Every structure is written in C-alpha cells, then in structure tokens.
Image: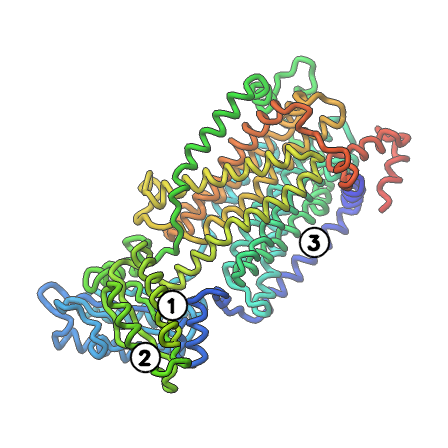
C-alpha cells in the first residue's frame, strides 16, 4: 500500500492543477445539486420492534387520521393573583385563543378547549389548551410554529401569564456559532504548531472542501433518501474533525521530509506513502464505527451513520490527493522561517530534544509508575459510570428562562408533575369476546397500580380499539414513571391471557423509555462489533496482537472514564453550575453510543498515527525503546495539536442552551482529552516500554496468513534504496510514479 500511495502522492503533486480542478468541480456539482434539490422534509422517527411503536402503528391502522404520534403542544394559562381562569374576561380570552389556534395552521389535527375537557386546576388558577398536530415535531413548518407562538403572545395582553410547552416548539439547535469558534481555535492551534500561515491554512481549506462536498451531497439527496437535518449536522461535525486531522498528518510528514533535505515532489510522495497509509486505516476505523450504528436498528441513526461515513471517506480521498496537490501550490512557504530554523537546529549535533522526545524518555525511565497513575486515575473517574441512568430529557431539563420550562413548571404546580408526560394505553379488543369489559378491567388494573389519574376508555368507530389516558404521579423522566409503564405492561399480560385483549403502552413518555432501553441493549453489541473489527484491522496494520489489544483496552478505559465524568456532572450535579447545568437527570440515551462512535474514530486516528511511526522506526532497525522515542519525536506535537483542535471544537457546544447539545459537547471534549493525553500519550508508551520486543510479536502462522499492507513503508524504503538514483537522481523515481 505504501508504494501505491507514494506513487499517488507524486502524481497528484505533479498534476496539481488537474487534481484541484477535479475537486473544485465536484464541490460545484454538489453545491448546485444541494441548491436545486427539493426541500427535504424532516426524517420520520420510528423505533421498529418496540411496544410504543407498535401501538402507534395500530392506531394509524384502526383510527386513521388521528395522528397519534404527531407533535403536541400545551398552551398554559395562569391567572393574575386574586383572579381565576374561569373569570368571564379570562375565560373569553382563552376561548378566543382556542379558535385562533384551530384556524392557525393546516397541520393542526385538533385543539382541545380546556373548559370542555376539564383542563382547569382545582383552585382555578391554571388551565391549558392541548394542541395536536398531524405530523411529528420534526415535520412542522416554521409558519405553524409561529402561529402557535403568536397565539401565546396575544393571550399575554390580557394580563394572564401564558407559556407554551410540548414538543411542537422543539427545533434542531443552531450550531453555527460553535462551529465558527471551533474553526477559529483550530486555525490558532495550527499556526502555533506549524509556525506558518500557509501550512496552517492547508488543513482548514481542504477539510472545508471535503465537508462542503459531503454536506452538499447529503442535502441534495435528503428528499430522496429521507435524511433529516440531524444527518448533515453529524456529518459536518465528524467531517470537519477528521478532515483537519488527516490533512494535518500529511502536511506534518511532508515538512519532516523537507527537513531531511528531500526535493518537494519526493517529500510529497513519501508523506502520502507513509502518513497516508496511517490515514487510510484510521479512516477505515471511523467508517466501521459509523456504519456500525446500524446494529441499533433505528432507521434515523443508520442513515446518519452511513452519511457521516461517506463524508469521512471523502476526507480520506482529499488527504491523499488534494492535500499533496495543495502542497505543490504552496511551494517552500509551507515551512516558514521559524520552522526552517527549527529544522536546521534539530539536525545540529548539540540540538536540544523537543518536548515529545523528553516526555518519551521520561516514560521509558518510569513506565510502571506512568501506567499505574494513568490507569488508576481514569479508573477512579470512571466509578460514577456504574450509576449511569439513561433516558431522554423532557422540558424540565430546559433552561428556566425558556417558555417550555416555565410551562412545564406551571403544569407541575397546577396539576402535578405527571401532567407533563401522560401515557396513552391502547387496548386492542379485536380478539376479545367483550371488548368493553376488557377495557374497563385495564382501567381498574391501572388505578390499582397507583397513578395520578385515569381517563375512561374511548373506543374507535369500529369498536375494536380503545385508548386510555393515564396521568402518572411523577415527572416524565423519573424512575417512578418508568416503573408505572412496566407495571401497566405486566398487568396487560394478565389481561391478554384472561380476555384475549392486547394492551400496549405508548405516548411520548413511553416512546422515550423504549428508545432508551433499545439504546441500552445495543451498547454492548455495538462496542463488541466496533472494537472487534478495529482489532482485526489494527492487527493487519501493526502486525501484532498485543498492540491492537492495548489500543482497544485503552479506548474502553477512556470511554468509561468519560461516561463517569458525564454522570458526575449531569446526573449527580457535581460542578454542574460551572457547566450551566440547571436540572440534573438521566443521561440522554443516545449519548453513550454516539460518543463511542465518534471518540473511537478519533482515538484510532491518534493511535495509528503515533504507533505507526514507532513501528516504522522499529522495522527500520531501531530498538523498541528508541522506536518509542522516535515516534514521539515526530508524532507527539501533531497528535497534541489534533486533540486540542477537537477539544476546542467540541467544547464550543458546551455553551449551548440545549441540555442535549451541552452534554454531547462535554462528553466528546472530555473523552478526547482522556484518550489523547492520558491513554495515547502516557499509558500506550508505558505499556510498549514494558513489553519491549514482545509488543511486535505475531505468531508465524498468523504472519503468513495476514496480507502485508506495508503501512510503515518498509517495502517502499527498500525499493527507493535499491533504485538507481533514488536519493537525488530522477531515473528510479520516474519508474515509481507510473501508475
């Protein structure tokens, strides 16, 4: 592989105008496609195989047009002090708002008058209008949301306090500011790392080209493939991260080859042949992690994973072709004056070793202590992960300043916390001899469990399906509400055996519980799949058993430690005020598996780039200890820069007002910190120092069975050395660039 990539690097360097034209043309085509494609409707959300989804599907079939899984909103009214919502003026205002809402949008399915449905608190201080929509919250138009907000503003003129809750106002958070901050910080770090504006600009420009092509393609295909807006956000986040990383690795190696005195074309070829090999395999591990999201069996997640994996593949191709072409345009400016002086100083006999070299030598002197401090430190931080509780945040997790949170609190005060998350119990009486008796028995069983309220069964026109609304005593995301859902389902099993009627629990709260359970069940299989396939891939790269095993175990340690930190901050509230956590609660169910996928890809980037340089030095004759020092001498600065850039990008999301985005930003930033600086920079060299030559051991039969992909460039080095004129002439190199 190294030989092929060497040829590719030299070819793209020489044909840089043609290569640049191809990528610019692809960007233009993708951009035109995105601009002319029909507007994408938001991706429909479904969770196949869950009871909540089966109940929604049954209602759609038996009672079409009700849109049971559509968005909902609650316009909550609180009368001024000393007044009641039932006072004539207030009642007239609320009734007028009901009529205004009914005609406000074609997407509305129904609007419930609070005075007709008894949605008035006992003391008369609070009332709410329930609004149901024909489509999910992801599919609501801006005009529909605006009409809902306008209705609330009109009611406030009467002096009543009016707030709006429910999922109808939920929109995808805008992350543009965070991305801009991340790119600015990335630029600063790159300038510091390279000491050259040209060298710093290359990774940014090429990464943005890759992200532009990837996201534009997703936008162009969104309507055809039913891709939601979250798909492009994930692709942008991952594409930007790996795009900068991969270009950074190639540019860094190119500068190192120039510092050795090689000609620019030769340096580009060797950079792509060596660092490019690491990029290919690092990219494959990221693709495995993202495509592996399919094991969760949630269509939306599967599409997100495949789309992001495509963006990563584009980032790899750009690193192997556009980056060396751009290096051709950059000329000698890619080094910069300070960088050239530093390179000359490093080659002088009495040169002071760089920070990476000094750190590697320290680890070699104290490997046991470094390993124990790293492992025990992460182990202690990981302890809270044992108390991990997963769920989906409700409006109670919103900032107190938002209308959703204030509506949530008003409902809790006026009616009880359970009113914020009613359950919908569906009774399929088609196979029951007495459907009404079966539905009544279900109501009695639910009342016996102990809930806030049970609204009597309501049958469809055919009389074969009943719905019962249940108000729990506790808030939607509480453990007590989850127990109520399980208790109703357990009681439903007895009802079915006795009457033949099937009982299904659904609604937003039950859907969240089922979603969390599905994500929880998928976490271990996903980890096993991703880590197992990556182990095989890394065994192919490093031709070793212990090095990939160490890489996988180190990754698991950093992920569990990151989960421990997330639980401590967001579930227990430790240092919560520092990160703007206003309401503790369960950890978002999608977060652990999402974090595993993203961080695994980045962790393997650092592992492959750092350790392949060690492997390269080892196969070229250096001792195991000296190979570790060489790897850190050339790779520590780049890996550190890449990790700092990623931490900066992810930390930008911690400032979001959305608890979900805040949690994702924190988890990714802390996980990258643990993996890059504790695992890859400390534990990895310590373990390799203790293992010595055993680290690179591979059984003979396995060595013969595995194809030799030559990631470290051993065959390339031998071929270049054997070719006549290889170190200064052109005759041998001309043969190599014929592809």
User: Which residue is pictured at 61% across the width and 53% down the height?
Assistant: 309
Number of marks in the rendered image: 3
Disc 1 from disc 3: Cα separation: 60 Å
Q: Do we see residue 144 in this rendering?
A: no
Looking at the image, residue 491 lies above or below residue 708: below
User: Which residue is pictured at 89% across the width and 32% down the height?
Assistant: 723
Position of residue 714 measured from the top left corner of the image (x, y, whole percent): 78, 32
Mark toward the viewer: 2 or 1: 1
262 displayed left or right of 242: right
602 displayed left or right of 29: left
Position of residue 28 measured from the top left corner of the image (x, y, whole percent): 66, 60
Badge 3 crowding class, 10 Å Cα cut-off, few under 14, some 14 to 19, many 20 or more, is some
Instruction: For mark 2, give the secondary structure.
Output: helix
Outermost residue, front side: 498
Mark 2 lies on residue: 102
Mark 1 lies on residue: 493
Identify the disc placed on residue 23: 3
Instruction: For mark 3, give the secondary structure.
Output: helix
Position of residue 97 measured from the top left corner of the image (x, y, whole percent): 25, 76
Badge 1 crowding class, 10 Å Cα cut-off, few under 14, some 14 to 19, many 20 or more, is some
- Mark toward the start of the polypeptide (3 vs 2): 3
Position of residue 180 measured from the top left corner of the image (x, y, whole percent): 49, 48
151 displayed left or right of 546: left
């Amino acid at each position: 592989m190294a030989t092929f990539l060497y040829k590719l690097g030299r070819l793209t360097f020489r044909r840089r105008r043609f290569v640049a034209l191809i990528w610019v043309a692809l960007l233009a085509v993708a951009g035109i496609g995105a601009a002319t494609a029909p507007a994408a409707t938001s991706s429909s959300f479904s969770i196949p195989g869950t009871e909540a989804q089966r109940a929604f599907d049954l209602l759609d079939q038996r009672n079409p047009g009700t849109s049971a899984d559509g968005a909902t909103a609650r316009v909550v009214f609180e009368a001024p002090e000393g007044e009641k919502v039932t006072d004539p003026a207030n009642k007239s205002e609320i009734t007028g708002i009901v009529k205004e809402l009914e005609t406000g949008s074609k997407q509305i399915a129904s609007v419930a008058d609070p005075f007709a449905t008894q949605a008035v608190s006992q003391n008369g201080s609070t009332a709410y209008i329930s609004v149901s929509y024909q489509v999910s919250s992801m599919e609501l138009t801006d005009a529909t949301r605006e009409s809902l907000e306008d209705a609330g503003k009109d009611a406030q003129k009467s002096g009543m306090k009016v707030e709006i809750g429910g999922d109808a106002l939920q929109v995808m958070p805008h992350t543009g500011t965070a991305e801009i901050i991340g790119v600015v910080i990335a630029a600063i770090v790159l300038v510091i790392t390279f000491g050259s504006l040209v060298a710093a600009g290359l990774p940014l420009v090429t990464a943005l080209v890759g992200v532009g092509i990837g996201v534009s393609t997703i936008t162009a295909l969104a309507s055809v493939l039913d891709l939601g807006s979250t798909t492009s956000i994930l692709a942008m986040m991952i594409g930007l991260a790996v795009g900068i990383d991969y270009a950074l690795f190639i540019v860094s190696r190119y500068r190192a080859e120039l510092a050795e005195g090689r000609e620019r074309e030769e340096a580009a070829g060797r950079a792509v042949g060596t660092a490019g090999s690491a990029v290919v395999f690092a990219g494959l591990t990221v693709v495995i992690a993202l495509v592996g999201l399919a094991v969760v069996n949630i269509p939306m997640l599967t599409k997100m994973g495949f789309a992001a994996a495509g963006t990563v593949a584009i980032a790899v191709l750009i690193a192997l072709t556009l980056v060396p072409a751009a290096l051709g345009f950059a000329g000698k400016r890619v080094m910069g004056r300070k960088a050239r002086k530093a390179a000359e100083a490093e080659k002088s006999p009495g040169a002071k070793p760089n920070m990476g070299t000094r750190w590697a030598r320290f680890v070699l002197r104290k490997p046991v202590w470094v390993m124990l401090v790293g492992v025990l430190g992460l182990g202690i931080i990981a302890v809270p992960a044992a108390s991990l509780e997963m769920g989906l945040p409700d409006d109670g997790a919103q900032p107190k300043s938002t209308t959703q949170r204030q509506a949530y609190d008003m409902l809790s005060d006026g009616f009880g916390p359970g009113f914020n998350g009613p359950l919908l119990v569906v009774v399929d009486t088609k196979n029951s001899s007495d459907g009404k008796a079966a539905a009544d028995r279900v109501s009695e069983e639910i009342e016996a469990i102990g809930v806030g309220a049970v609204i009597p069964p309501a049958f469809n026109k055919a009389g074969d399906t009943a719905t019962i609304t249940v108000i729990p005593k506790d808030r939607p995301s509480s453990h007590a509400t989850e127990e109520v859902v399980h208790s109703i389902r357990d009681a439903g099993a007895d009802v079915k055996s006795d009457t033949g009627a099937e009982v299904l629990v659904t609604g937003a709260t039950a859907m969240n519980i089922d979603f969390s359970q599905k994500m929880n069940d998928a976490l271990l299989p996903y980890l096993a799949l991703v880590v197992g396939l990556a182990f095989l891939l890394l065994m192919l790269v490093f031709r070793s058993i212990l090095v990939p095993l160490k890489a996988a175990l180190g990754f698991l340690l950093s992920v569990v430690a990151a989960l421990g930190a997330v639980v401590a901050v967001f579930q227990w509230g430790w240092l919560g005020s520092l990160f703007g956590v206003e309401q503790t609660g369960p950890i978002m169910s999608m977060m652990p598996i999402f974090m595993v996928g993203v961080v695994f890809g980045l962790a393997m980037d650092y592992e492959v780039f750092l350790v392949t340089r060690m492997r390269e030095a080892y196969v070229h004759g250096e001792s195991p200890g000296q190979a570790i020092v060489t790897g850190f001498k050339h790779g520590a600065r780049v890996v550190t820069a890449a990790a700092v850039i990623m931490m900066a990008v992810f930390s930008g999301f911690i400032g979001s007002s959305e608890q979900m985005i805040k949690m994702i930003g924190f988890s990714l930033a802390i996980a990258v910190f643990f993996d890059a600086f504790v695992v890859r920079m400390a534990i990895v060299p310590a373990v390799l120092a203790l293992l010595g030559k055993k680290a690179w051991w591979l059984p003979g039969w396995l060595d013969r069975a595995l194809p030799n992909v030559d990631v470290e460039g051993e065959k390339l080095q031998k071929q270049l050395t054997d070719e006549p004129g290889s170190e200064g002439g052109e005759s041998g190199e001309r043969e190599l660039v014929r592809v």
